[in-house]
Image (spheres, rainbow, N blue to C red):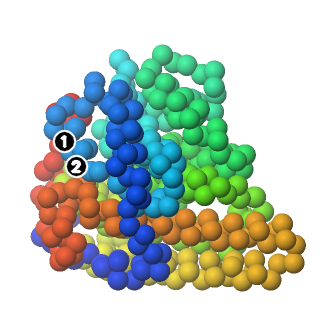
């Protein structure tokens, strides 16, 4: 494993060049939707979290990322995203089951950090079966929570959007379990291998699906498969996980979990220092942003020149979908400095200076029951 030699790192100013996806601010329905989502979530989490973990999760402001990344949706739509994005662990007598949906998504990330690969795989299987099979029931609170989400929100999406959402869940949750297995084995992937895995473990695909659903888009597969659309889509995926990995690196290395982070991956493959890796990743971000912008512009030109009105409208929906993904790119950056998840009480200072003082490796052991 790469050794830590630096005592601090300087982050790139992503806001300086990720300005074209506009900063639309916080959704005006944030306060009401947040209160409703927290009340719903509380019935599931009280038996799991100890006071320290509960306080930490409260400081993470998971609902706020939804208000930054879905800035224009109505209150009901925003509530749906908050239910999906907040982390939620659910216990059985044999293992800790988690779901990953901003309510269900974030904690899959946090909890599978504490699970073995086997337990994380079981957690993923429960989520997927409950999403896909209305008759499935294992007696756990996990099933009830997923069932409620499926009935209240997923059933309203268009058939193409719903199909892709379920397919993306089929991949994302097992990918999270795969990450837990790699951590157990102490393996660090190549840059390309890690990017392939991280595009799935980020959960961003399902969040993109939510954006389409809430924008009233049911994108036909013929548009979804276009090269221009795929380039823009993949670029947005990468921008989200690259920023997230840089911001979360200090937190993860303090827990000893930095093997599954692009910073460590680049350090190993390029045989470079932490700061050199950060600078390399910043260049990757600029490249991906350029790809995103060019792909969106190319798709828009194609829509304007298309003679078939139905297909032209579908192409315009593709452009709008890419714009929705852009809200995620920008909103993720904005939220990262509003939450204490990555930088603790120093989040405002880090936003100003971009300097992160590195904690001692393996110095944090945050348990769910603490």
Q: Which SS class for mark 1?
A: helix
Can see residue 298? Answer: yes
> Between marks 1 and 2, how big is the CA–CA gap?
6 Å
In the image, which disc is placed on residue 131? none
Relative image position of residue 105 (x, y in whole percent): 43, 44
Q: Quadrant of the C terminus?
A: top left
Residue linked to disc 2: 59
Q: Nearer the viewer, residue 127 or 152?
A: 152
Residue at the spot of label 1: 55
Quadrant position of residue 94: top left
Q: Picture coordinates of residue 115 (x, y %)?
A: 34, 36
Examine the rendered structure and indicate whether residue 338 appears above or below residue 142: below
The front one of 168 and 209 is 209
Task: Indicate left or right for 5 with 222 as reference.
Answer: left
Residue drawn at 19 percent across, 64 percent down: 347
Dot 2 falls on a residue whose secondary structure is helix
Residue at image location 35% in from the left, 17% down from the top = 93
Query: Can residue 198 be seen here?
Result: no
- Marker count (numbered): 2
Residue in view at x 49 percent, y 36 percent = 124
Question: Which sits in the foreground, 44 or 22?
Answer: 22
Q: Are marks 1 and 2 in contact (CB under 8 Å)?
A: yes
Q: In the image shown, does 311 or 186 lie closer to the viewer?
A: 311
Residue at the right extreme of this rendering: 308
């Amino acid at each position: 494993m790469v050794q830590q030699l630096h005592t601090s790192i300087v982050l790139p100013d992503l806001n300086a060049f990720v300005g074209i996806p506009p900063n639309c601010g916080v959704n005006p329905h944030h306060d009401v939707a947040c209160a409703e989502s927290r009340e719903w979530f509380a019935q599931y989490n009280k038996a799991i979290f100890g006071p320290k973990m509960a306080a930490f999760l409260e400081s993470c402001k998971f609902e706020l990322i939804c208000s930054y990344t879905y800035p224009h949706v109505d209150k009901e739509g925003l509530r749906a995203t908050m239910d999906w994005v907040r982390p939620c662990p659910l216990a059985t007598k044999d293992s800790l089951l988690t779901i990953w949906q901003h309510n269900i998504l974030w904690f899959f990330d946090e909890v599978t950090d504490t699970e073995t690969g086997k337990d994380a795989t079981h957690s993923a299987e429960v989520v997927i079966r409950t999403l896909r099979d209305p008759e499935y029931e294992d007696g756990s609170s996990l099933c009830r929570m997923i069932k409620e989400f499926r009935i209240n929100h997923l059933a309203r999406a268009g058939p193409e959007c719903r199909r892709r959402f379920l397919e993306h869940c089929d991949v994302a949750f097992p990918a999270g379990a795969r990450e837990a297995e790699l951590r157990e084995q102490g393996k660090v992937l190549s840059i390309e291998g890690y990017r392939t895995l991280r595009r799935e473990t980020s959960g961003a695909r399902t969040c993109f699906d939510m954006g389409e659903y809430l924008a009233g888009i049911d994108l036909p597969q013929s548009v979804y498969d276009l090269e221009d659309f795929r380039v823009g889509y993949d670029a947005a995926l990468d921008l989200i996980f690259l920023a997230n990995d840089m911001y979360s690196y200090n937190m993860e290395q303090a827990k000893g979990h930095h093997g599954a982070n692009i910073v460590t991956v680049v350090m190993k493959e390029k045989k470079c220092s932490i700061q050199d890796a950060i600078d390399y990743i910043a260049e990757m971000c600029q490249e991906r942003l350029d790809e995103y912008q060019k792909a969106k512009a190319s798709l828009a030109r194609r829509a304007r020149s298309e003679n078939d009105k139905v297909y032209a409208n579908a192409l315009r929906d593709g452009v709008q979908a890419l714009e929705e993904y852009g809200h995620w790119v920008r909103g993720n950056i904005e939220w990262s400095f509003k939450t204490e998840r990555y930088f603790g009480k120093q989040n405002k200072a880090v936003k100003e200076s971009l300097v992160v003082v590195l904690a001692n490796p393996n110095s944090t052991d945050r348990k769910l029951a603490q």
